[in-house]
Image (cartoon, helix red, strand yellow):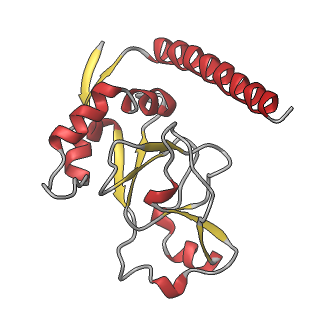
Amino acid sequence: MEYKKLGHIAKIQTGPFGSQLHQSDYIPTGIPCIMPCNIGSNLNIICDNIAYISEEDLNRLAKHKTQEGDIVYSRRGDIEKCAYISSRESGWLCGTGCLKVSIDSTIALPKYVAYLLSTPESKAWLVGNAVGTTMLNLNTTVLSDFPICLPDLDTQKKVVEIIDSIADKIELNKRINDNLEYS
C-alpha cells in the first residue's frame, strides 16, 4: 500500500465563480449544470431542479466540463457528499459552488477514489480539516491534502467490482420494495 495526497493523484478545479456564470445565463433546457443541491448522498447526481446552460456557455467554461470518472464536491455547507460522474453526466458543467476532482487513472481508479472519499472516516477527515466555523468550506488546498491509501491497480479494481456488485443488489432490492409498496 502506498500513501499519497489526493492532490498528487488528481487535478482539483474550483467551479466557475459568479463573475464567470451569472443567474441570467441559466436557460430552461440545455446542458445540465451540477450545483451543490444536485449532489446526492450515494455518489449520485440528483437531476430534480437542475439548472441548464447553453452550449456556447459550456464552450466558454470548458475547463469546468465534467468527464466520466470525475468526482464533484460541494464547496460549502454539506461538504461530506460527493458525486461520481458516470457516462450519463459526462459533458455536463461542474457549477458554481462545486469542486471537480479529476483522478489520474494511471495511478488510481477514479471509482475506487470516489468510494474511498465516501467512507465515514474520509468524511470525518474533511469535516475536521474544512475551513470556516459557521459554515464549513472545502477548497482545493484542503482536498489536495487529503491522505489517500492506494493499493495496486488490480486490488483497486477488485474492490470496485465488489462494491459495485453490492450497490447493484441494494438498488435492485430497493426497486423490488418500491414495487411491493405500490402493488
Identify the residue at the far bottom of this view: 24
Q: Is residue 53 left or right of residue 64?
A: right
Image vertical order of residue 20 relative to residue 77, above or below:
below
**Is 4 in front, or is 29?**
29
- Splitting the image into 4 quarters, where does residue 132 fall? bottom left
Q: Residue at x 54, y 12 (%)?
A: 158
From the viewer's perspective, is residue 130 above or below residue 146? below
Locate the N terminus and report the quarter of the image it occupies: top left
Point 55% across, 18% down: residue: 163
Residue 10 horizontal side relative to residue 63, left or right: left
Q: Is residue 153 above or below residue 45?
A: above
The image shows residue 12 at horizontal and vertical percentages of 34, 50
* Residue at left offset 53%, top offset 55%: 66
Residue 88 percent coordinates (x, y): 68, 49
Q: Residue at x 35, y 48 (%)?
A: 11
Quarter containing the C terminus: top right
Residue 165: x, y in percent?
64, 17
In this rendering, position of residue 128 left or right of residue 69: left
Instruction: Pick the residue in front: 130 or 3.
Output: 130
Question: How far across and down, in percent of the image, does residue 72 sit?
Answer: 44, 49
> Which residue is most to the right?
183
| Number of marks | 0
In this rendering, the answer to whether 49 lies above or below 47 is below
Quarter-of-image position of residue 104: top left
